[in-house]
Image (cartoon, rainbow, N blue to C red):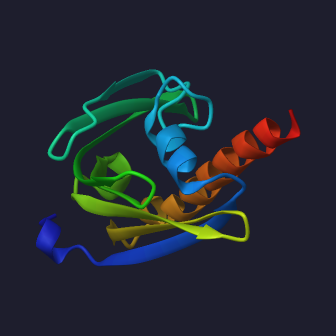
């Protein structure tokens, strides 16, 4: 199947995280910190620079799911943007844009994922990103409770 023949869609999920934008940004990107998208994965290689590449493998449903991408924008406390390629994107390069805005004493995190194949695996990204925003929020809730 040619990628130009695949129907795609975009999704947006949002959540207010109880922490300041700079801290949310730092946690998101630091694989050593619980709450990071790369914390606890099977393997992560992350070159945190514009045009830097990342690879991570997640254990899910008794198998490894590799993910690849390239950072497009890194603006501390404001935005993270990178490409995203996996089996669930059918090898199509999609783009994830995370914006961070101060709101209600915390940070409104809005994640926009563009160019996802419009099939069951592609639509599963909504659940995955929603789950991850919940993990991030719980990390900051636990930190605030200490």
Residue 122 on image: x %, y %: 42, 63
Task: State the quadrant of the N terminus.
Answer: bottom left
Reply above or below: 22 against 27. Answer: below
Residue 46 lies in quadrant: top left
Residue 58 on image: x %, y %: 47, 32
Q: Residue furthest right?
A: 145
Q: Out of 71 and 26, give the one closest to the viewer.
A: 26
Q: Residue at x 55, y 24 (%)?
A: 40
Q: Out of 17 and 9, give the one closest to the viewer.
A: 17
Residue 68 lies in quadrant: top left
Q: Is residue 59 left or right of residue 19?
A: left
Q: Residue at x 39, y 60 (%)?
A: 79
Reply above or below: 138 against 33. Answer: below
Residue 94 on image: x %, y %: 27, 61
Reply above or below: 10 against 82. Answer: below
Task: State the quadrant of the C terminus.
Answer: top right
Q: Out of 89 and 11, give the one closest to the viewer.
A: 11
Reply above or below: 11 against 98. Answer: below
Q: Is residue 61 left or right of residue 117?
A: right
Q: Out of 144 and 52, give the one closest to the viewer.
A: 144
Q: Residue at x 60, y 49 (%)?
A: 132
Q: Is residue 1 left or right of residue 62?
A: left
Label tally: 0
Residue 24 on image: x %, y %: 56, 48
């Amino acid at each position: 199947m040619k990628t130009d023949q695949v129907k795609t869609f975009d999704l947006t999920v949002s959540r207010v995280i109880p922490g300041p934008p700079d801290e949310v940004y730092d946690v998101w990107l630091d694989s050593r910190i619980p709450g990071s998208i790369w914390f606890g994965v099977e393997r992560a290689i992350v070159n945190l620079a514009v045009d830097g590449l990342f690879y991570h493998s997640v254990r899910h449903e008794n198998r490894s799911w590799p993910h690849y991408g390239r950072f497009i924008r890194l603006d501390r406390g404001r935005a993270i943007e990178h490409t995203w390629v996996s089996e669930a994107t059918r090898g199509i390069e999609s783009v994830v844009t995370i914006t961070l805005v101060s709101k209600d004493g915390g940070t409104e995190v809005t994640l926009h994922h563009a160019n996802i194949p419009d099939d069951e695996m592609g639509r599963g990204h909504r659940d995955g990103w929603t789950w991850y925003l919940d993990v991030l929020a719980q990390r900051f809730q636990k930190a605030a409770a200490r």
